[in-house]
Image (cartoon, helix red, strand yellow):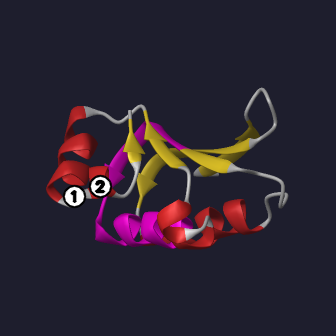
Amino acid sequence: MAVLTASSADGKELIIKIKGRFDFSTHQEFRGAYEQAPLEMSGYIVDLKDATYLDSSALGMLLLLRDHAGGDSAHVKIVNCNADVKKILTISNFEQLFTIQ
């Protein structure tokens, strides 16, 4: 499985971990991860520590998560990015839409 989920310690945020390639092949798993989350979640954390690849469809999936989470009022963090992934996110101006750590 390429997409794993967990709740944060306080139970208020959904942590979505990506393992391996983050591309169109993970679309259904990724979407299912946040759509099936309890409604009381106040934010989302996308952990890319184990992601080995990210493409334009992954960027689109992150935007869909942001829309699902409330658009401009969304609380979505992208964490544990390697240098290559962080460069892609920066070039795409995602630091203006997401908290990237």
The part of the image, by quadrant, that contains residue 10 is top right
Q: Going by the image, does 7 lie left or right of 90?
A: right
Residue at 49%, 44% in the rendered image: 77
Q: Which residue is mark 1?
A: 93
Number of callouts in the render?
A: 2
- In the image, farthest residue toward the front: 73
* Observer-nearest of 50 and 35: 35
Tell me where residue 85 appears, x and y as whole percent: 27, 45
Q: Going by the image, does 32 lie left or right of 85?
A: right
Tell me where residue 27 appears, x and y as whole percent: 54, 71
Q: Tag 1: residue type?
A: Asn
* Observer-nearest of 77 and 46: 77
Q: Is residue 39 magenta?
A: no
Residue at 22%, 34% in the rendered image: 83
The part of the image, by quadrant, that contains residue 15 is top right
Q: Secondary structure at mark 1?
A: loop
Tell me where residue 25 appears, x and y as whole percent: 49, 69
Residue at 41%, 53% in the rendered image: 21
Q: Nearer the viewer's eye, disc 1 or disc 2?
A: 2
Residue at 64%, 51% in the rendered image: 1
Q: Going by the image, does 53 lie left or right of 91?
A: right
Q: Is residue 65 magenta?
A: yes
* Observer-nearest of 50 and 80: 80
Q: Tag 2: residue type?
A: Gln
Tell me where residue 55 appears, x and y as whole percent: 30, 63
The quarter in which the C terminus is drawn is: top left
**Residue span colored magenta:** 46-66
Q: Is residue 6 above or below residue 68?
A: above
Q: Which residue is mark 2?
A: 96
Q: Secondary structure at mark 2?
A: helix
- In the image, farthest residue toward the top: 9
User: Which of the numbered marks, if any, corresponds to residue 1?
Assistant: none
